[in-house]
Image: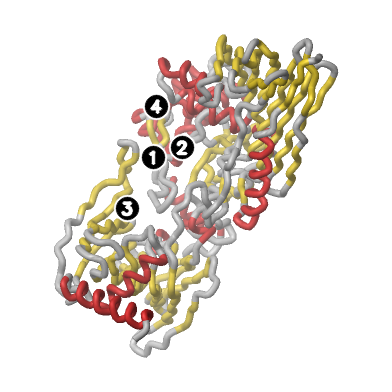
Amino acid sequence: MNRILLSILFICFTTTIFSQKNKVDPTDFAFAEKMKAAHEDSSVAALSSDIEVSFDFNTKSEKVEVIVKSVEVFVSLKPNINFAIGEFYDDYSSVGNIEVRNSKGKFININRTDETYSQNGIFYSDSKICYFGVPFPTIGTRRKVSITKKYDDIRYFISEYLVDRYPMRSRNITINIPRWLNLEIKEMNFDNEKSKAIPNDKFDGKVISYFTKDVAPKVDEVDSKGPTHLYPHVLFLYQGYNYKGKTNLGLKTTKDLYTWYQHLTTGMKNDPSAVAALAKELTAEAATDTEKIKAIYYWVQENIRYIAFEDGIAGFQPDDCQEVFNKRYGDCKGMANLTKEMLKSIGFDARLTWIGTRRLSYDYSTPSLGVDNHMICAVKLNGEFIFLDATEDFGALGQYAERIQGRPVLIEDGTNFITSQIPVSPYSNNTSYTFRRLQLEEDKLVGTSRLELNGESQAQFLYHINNMKQDLREDALKYYLTDSDKSCKATDIQTSDFKQRDEVMTIDYNFEWKKGVSSFGDEIYLDLDLEKEYKSGLFDERKTDYLFNYKLHNVTEVEFEIPNGYTVSTLPENLKKEHTDFTFKVDYSQKDNTILYRKEIMIPNAEIKKENFEAWNKAVKDLTKQYKSQIALKKES
């Protein structure tokens, strides 16, 4: 008997013994071992995942209800785990029956917990979460989990995905569309997924099924696009019903979507008198309308704490302005509404504005509540709209965060609406500029340095420094300016106003860097670049596009005075790497008795696409190699 056959028999024998001892089906154990090898970061895998979507008509509310029942058979890939499952719901939905059974069909008791969703200690009034743990004592343990979720209004039922956070052997989504319901299903990011209509004589309507197999889990990577860009899913577009003579037009057009938004906002009970006095006080000394807008906009940024909830639906009706004002916190809707009411109280034409951030792949050609996940304020000045996103701390008036640039917006206009687009800013608006004038003093580089921050590079710096305790700021600033290099010192630091966001942020200081100089014999070796951005910043196993917070433009210029008695024996070669996603430029030159160093790094689109990772990695390796090059000075004989 050959060794390969002996090995196979041994594996089968030990697998059977292990499975019998732990009461695990050998087939499940073999499946678990196979999935564990393919997905080492996963703790469970689904043998099957079946989701059934049904619709019912509520005669009392005259709304279409949605019932989503999921039945999933899990197998554990690791021993002794308690797999956490959670479902979000809100005022428009509920999580009903939950069942967990073992491989023999017997019920397993679980501890279900329902609580109001909170973030940073603040509770949302309409966002809740139901969660529970499913025990898996050994590898290959099987559990069947059934969950029923109900949506009271079909408008709040957005999509179903064909992928999940765990690997699956198969997923099947069955949609039962009754004849009285007008529902369009839009397939997003589809590739090999199969769909088909299933005949059903017992059902008065249409049954559609989507099936996929051998499904890898969702990739959990930081700074990536939202799931609507990445994964296959079906989008449900509700277009109305005709049920026993009762009709509703649904959300067929952008007008229908706006009408629904307007219906929600008219339910608010704003009390402008609660905020009018402060608005008048803030703008009392403002000489122009622009200054008045700034005064209110910046006050909301600095004094109302933002609580974010981008995924899922946390309700669409903003909190009343006085509620946000009194609590001193709110989500984007509440902050937009407060900004609007404060501006209106002193005579401005301010309006609520709906927008979907770059996290979403949809636009208003798809009339769905899933199109928008954010709200801002628009104020009309000299016939043009200026957009105010008070959730962006220390963003200047007219400066827009990358996450909303270029995105379509829906502006309220009474019974009508206005569509527009957030302006797109060039990368040069965010320039971070460092200038140093240095000379050699004994065994170190000394001189003066100036840092100028613009646009989003400035806003990010101001956000962090202003959210830091006062007694920590000086040390944090030194750490930042010296790039955490202990051989570097920043002294006599002078800064512009940390509250000022309308002018260029400046930091002037004296600079000293010991590691920038080394010597050997009659030669001195210089390194003029402290920061060395993206040194060894390679994308190795990343699977999705990398998104930056904003378009980057970093420029460093250094003037070094050549000491008396020395000449330049070596200047490093220049570097130039240009690509649609990035540019690296490093230039060395000599002018009279001065060495000039200039480095420029650009990320003009705020992203590196996956297909460009290879080009990026090659350029970064060349840049890293360039950083290791040094200037050589030779003592004159």
Left/right placement of residue 502 relative to residue 37 reads: right
Q: Earlier in the sequence, mark 3 or mark 4?
A: 3
The quarter of the picture where residue 627 lies is top right
Q: Earlier in the sequence, mark 2 or mark 3?
A: 3
Q: Mark 3 belongs to which amino acid?
A: Asp
| Residue drawn at x 53%, y 38% as measured from the top left | 377
Query: Marks 2 and 1: CB-CB under 8 Å?
Result: yes
Q: Is residue 296 visible?
A: no
| Residue drawn at x 38%, y 58% as measured from the top left | 41
Tell which of 385 and 360 is nearer to you: 360
User: Above or below — where is 201 with respect to 480?
Assistant: below
Helix, strand or loop at mark 4 = helix
Helix, strand or loop at mark 2 = helix
Q: Mark 1 belongs to which amino acid?
A: Asp
Q: CA distance from mark 2 to mark 1?
A: 8 Å
User: Above or below — where is 125 with respect to 234?
Assistant: above
The N terminus - image quarter: bottom left
Q: Disc 4 vs disc 2: which is toward the camera?
A: 2
Q: Which mark is residue 458?
A: none
User: In the image as oriented, which residue stretches furthest toward the right?
Assistant: 592
Q: Earlier in the sequence, mark 2 or mark 1?
A: 1
Left/right placement of residue 430 relative to residue 68 reads: right
Query: Marks 2 and 3: CB-CB under 8 Å?
Result: no
Read off the residue under disc 4.
274
Q: Which mark is residue 319?
A: 1
* Mark 2 crowd level (few <14, some 14–19, many ≥20, 10 Å Cα): many
Q: Disc 4 vs disc 1: which is toward the camera?
A: 1
Q: Which mark is residue 90?
A: 3
Left/right placement of residue 581 relative to residue 416 reads: right
Read off the residue under disc 2.
337
